[in-house]
Amino acid sequence: MAAVKIFVIGSVNGRLETAFQKLTTLHQKQHFSLAIFTGDLFSQDQDADSISRLLNGEIKIPISTYFTVGTVPLPEQVVERVEKGEDVCENLHFLGKRSVTNTSDGIRIVALGGALDKTIVAGQSKEQHLPLHTPDDAKALRGANTADILLTTCWPSNIWAKSARALSADVQATIPSTDQVADLCAVLKPRYHFAAAPGDIFYEREPFFHPSDSSDSDQRHVTRFISLAPLGNASKAKAMYAFNIVPKELTTSIPHGSTMSPLIPNSKKRRAPIDDQANGHGQYNGGRRVKRKREQPSPPGPDRCFFCLTNTDIDTHMICCIGDDSYVTTAKGPLPSPKTSASSGLSFPGHQLIIALSHEPTIRAMGEDANKTYQEMTRFRESMQAMVADSTKFKLGGITFEITRQSGIHAHWQFIPIPSDLIRKGLVEAGFRVEAENRQYPPFEELALGSGVEETSDFFRLWIWSDDGDTGVQSKELVMRFDGSIRFDLQFGRKVVAKLLGLEDRAYWQDVVQSIADETHDAENFKEAFKPWDFTQN
């Protein structure tokens, strides 16, 4: 299908001739398919002359234009016409307060106009032109199932959560937002959600993605939330927006800079892990093997995998940035504490996970996506190395390690800051080699595996990196290959680093799990420090 070009404008507040002249001028240049007006098209004290000119067709509207009720009632003359089932005038279509509309261009618009009326205990509102809706009005629209565009007067509650585009507390207090609209957006998963601005503000949130409905589908549901300022506002905040949309187009990738949906509660209790693979979030028994007989469960699918963004139980408050093929999150039960490297200039643990978006046990299992996934994960690793060195004036370097097993669940790497002097003195490399020898593991080899697509064996890989700002960068890649005859400890990397840093009391993640508030604080501190190197924001 061809793309549909849509023009959207904020509250007109009765300035009809100005608004439609603006639309006419822009349409002559841009050739829009349709237009949408958010908020209030009419004002509380709309003059009768302009209404008459509109109804009589003297105010020309060049293309199909849609609107719903905002915060003020529709003028009586307009109500009389729409109650007859007629358009307001040629090309001006009232969507109704609660409606589902499929345009001739194939665009599905779901509208919920007016403010929430909590005084109505139950039932749907009868009058389609009054600027109020009930909880049941919102609930009824969930039956639409999908929407290209969701048009509401109220904002979804906490839509600014998880966003780097902050709104001040004063502005938040002025915004009419409701859980009912949030729930509606979460159910419909619209591609665009437009809501009226309460004043002279423009707000465009980063795109956010919803959990997948099916582990068998590659489709990604991504919503862009936008609130336009009123037309002609004194602050000159953005009041117009244009975009292209292809009807029924499936989205299979997540845009740069996207976040997890802010409409998903963080309070959901996480289920018990299915497999004993160490995942850095702590879904493992910490190396202590439980001696009990049990059948080996099948590996969890994306809906139960604690690394898959489609899992509704994922700790979204710990996600820091998302690329095209991988993302970065803080580790649950981090090995360093926020105080560990504070004297070096790092005010957060810095224990991060770089996780592939594809639900595969290894990078090599990703087929044609293997190399580009490896390249992006490497870019994240190198960016974090640079951030740590710069933030600490080269006092810290970093190590990154991965366990690649064909019997694993989801490919990921772990990054941990390490004092540069330990690296420069060779103590980090020695610590890993000695521990491997003590456990009678195969020896480490120094080699560059790249994406590892040619490797046939399982392996543990370690990158050691430091930059002292003087003699330059020192880096090394060590690889230990092993097979099924080796009972490899999935906490091997963490335990070695714990000894090197004198953090043996933090070797097991269960002993150092943080509160959600502390986890959120550490994630936000990391994101702030990482901003200059975060290529997903470009």
Image (cartoon, rainbow, N blue to C red):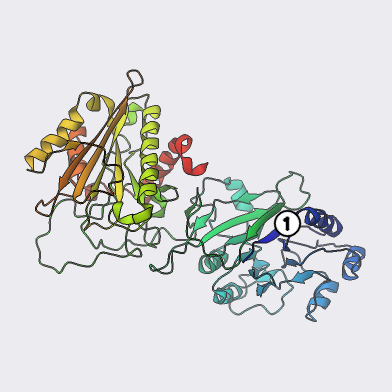
Q: Which residue is farthest front?
A: 454
Q: Nearer the viewer, residue 510 or 465?
A: 465
Quadrant position of residue 388: top left
Question: Is 335 on the left or on the right of 31, as rendered?
Answer: left
Please give the count of numbered marks on the rendered protein: 1
Where is 536 relative to 35, above or below?
A: above
Instruction: Give the class, few, some or many, for how many residues have Cα within 10 Å of label 1's Cα (few <14, many ≥20).
Output: many
Q: Secondary structure at mark 1?
A: strand
Q: Which residue occupies 36% across, 28% down?
A: 389
Q: Which residue occupies 78% across, 65% down?
A: 63
Q: Position of residue 189 (x, y in %)?
A: 53, 65
Question: Is 481 on the left or on the right of 301, as rendered?
Answer: left
Q: Position of residue 169 (x, y in %)?
A: 57, 47
Q: Is residue 197 visible?
A: no
Where is 392 relative to 232, above or below?
A: above
**Which residue is disc 1 drawn over?**
9
Where is 488 relative to 407, above or below?
A: above
Q: Nearer the viewer, residue 530 or 154?
A: 530
Q: Is residue 376 visible?
A: yes
Question: Is 253 on the left or on the right of 452, as rendered?
Answer: right
Q: Position of residue 256 (x, y in %)?
A: 50, 48
Amino acid tagged 1: Ile
Q: Nearer the viewer, residue 301 or 97?
A: 301
Q: Position of residue 55 (x, y in %)?
A: 88, 70
Q: Which residue occupies 10% across, 51% down?
A: 486
Quadrant position of residue 497: top left
Q: Which residue is farthest top?
A: 470
Question: Is 86 on the left or on the right of 102, as rendered?
Answer: right
Q: Nearer the viewer, residue 340 or 443?
A: 443
